[in-house]
Structure formats: C-alpha cells, structure tokens
Image (cartoon, rainbow, N blue to C red):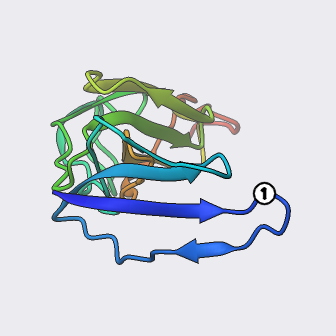
C-alpha cells in the first residue's frame, strides 16, 4: 500500500507544496490530507483504499449464433431477419469488474447498453444490406475493450416472382 500526501495550499494564493507520484496499477493507495488553521496542522488519513485500473477488458467471444452462418447464404435460415447472439463473459485483468456490454446491430437497431450478466442479444436485421453485430465490454473503472464485429449476415425475405411468360 502507498500513502499519497496532499500538502497545505494557501486558499488566497493557491500556492503550496505538492507531492507528485507515479500511479501504478500494481499498488493500493489511500489519501492523507494535512491542513492548518493558521496556528496548528491537522492531518486526516482516509480509511478507504483505492486502486488504479487503466486496463480495458478483453474482446468478447461469441459462443453461439441462432440464425444463419456469416458471410454466406445459409439455406433455410437467411430468410429470417431475427438473429440471436450468445457470448461468454469478458475477462478483465484489472481490479475493476465488467460493468456492461455495448451491442449494436448494423443494418438493424442502434446501440444498446446491457448489464454485466446479460449473455445474449437478438438483432432484427435488414434485408438486402450487409448486417453485422458489434459488441464490446466496459469495466466499472470506465475502460472499454476493443469491439468485435460478427458478420456479415445477408438477409433475403422477399420471395422470387415470375415476371414473364413461361416456356416449356
């Protein structure tokens, strides 16, 4: 554990002595504040320990897709625009925990933020365009991991029509 000391600062001149330190992700910290009333010095030491976390969560890994396979026409499935994605929990090497998942269905609905225990999301994809899912994890220190794209998914819900005369 490391103690951070904040020295007195004159409120009128905003001058004082500062103790600077390099913050490490491998340490725990607490604060001590020293102040004076013009006669005596007082010190207050925090009992709350905190850590620094600048490490983003790992990429989210997809475990199952209920719908067509990506990057190809999937007979019997590519005519259904509803695709549900399932993923495993993201890993975070920092002291923070996973706080949320951000998902976006490109070619469908917009960005949605989901809770840390959610492991699936349905997309309603558009017909005739390239559709993809983008997912990333964010930890409770505010670090957002790299997004992972899944797709492209091609949806065709329009049945073929006959426009000319048939010949035998």
Identify the residue at the far front of this view: 39
The image quadrant that residue 120 belongs to is: top left
Q: Is residue 111 visible?
A: yes
Q: Is residue 13 left or right of residue 134?
A: right
- Regarding mark 1 in the picture, which secondary structure is present there? loop
- Residue displayed at 16% across by 48% down: 91
Of residue 129 and residue 101, the one placed in the foreground of this image is 101
- Residue displayed at 39% across by 36% down: 101
Look at the image and tell me in which quarter the N terminus lies: bottom left
- Residue displayed at 36% across by 61% down: 4
Residue tagged by mark 1? 11
- Image position, residue 73 (x, y; %): 34, 48
Q: Is residue 88 left or right of residue 118?
A: left
Of residue 26 and residue 85, the one placed in the foreground of this image is 26
- Image position, residue 136 (x, y; %): 38, 48
Of residue 71 and residue 34, the one placed in the foreground of this image is 34
The image quadrant that residue 108 belongs to is: top right
Q: How many marks?
A: 1
The image quadrant that residue 13 belongs to is: bottom right
Q: Is residue 130 visible?
A: no
Q: Is residue 63 left or right of residue 131?
A: left
Q: Residues within 10 Å of mark 1 (few under 14, many from 20)?
A: few
Q: Is residue 79 above or below residue 106?
A: above
- Residue displayed at 25% across by 22% down: 117
Q: Is residue 26 above or below residue 137?
A: below
Q: Is residue 65 above or below residue 72?
A: above
- Image position, residue 32 (x, y; %): 38, 51
- Image position, residue 105 (x, y; %): 52, 39
């Amino acid at each position: 554990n490391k103690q951070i000391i904040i020295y007195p600062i004159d409120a009128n001149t905003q001058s004082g002595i500062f103790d600077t330190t390099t913050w490490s992700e491998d340490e725990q910290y607490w604060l001590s504040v020293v102040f004076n009333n013009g006669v005596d010095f007082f010190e207050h030491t925090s009992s709350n320990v905190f850590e620094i976390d600048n490490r983003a969560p790992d990429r989210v890994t997809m475990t199952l897709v209920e719908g067509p396979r990506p990057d190809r026409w999937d007979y019997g499935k590519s005519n259904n625009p509803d695709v549900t994605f399932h993923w495993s929990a993201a890993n975070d090497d920092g002291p923070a925990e996973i706080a949320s998942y951000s998902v976006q269905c490109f070619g469908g609905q917009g960005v949605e933020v989901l809770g840390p225990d959610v492991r699936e999301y349905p997309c309603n994809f558009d017909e005739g365009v390239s559709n993809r899912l983008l997912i990333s994890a964010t930890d409770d220190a505010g670090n957002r991991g790299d997004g992972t794209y899944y797709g492209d998914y091609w949806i065709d819900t329009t049945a073929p029509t006959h426009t000319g005369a048939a010949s035998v």
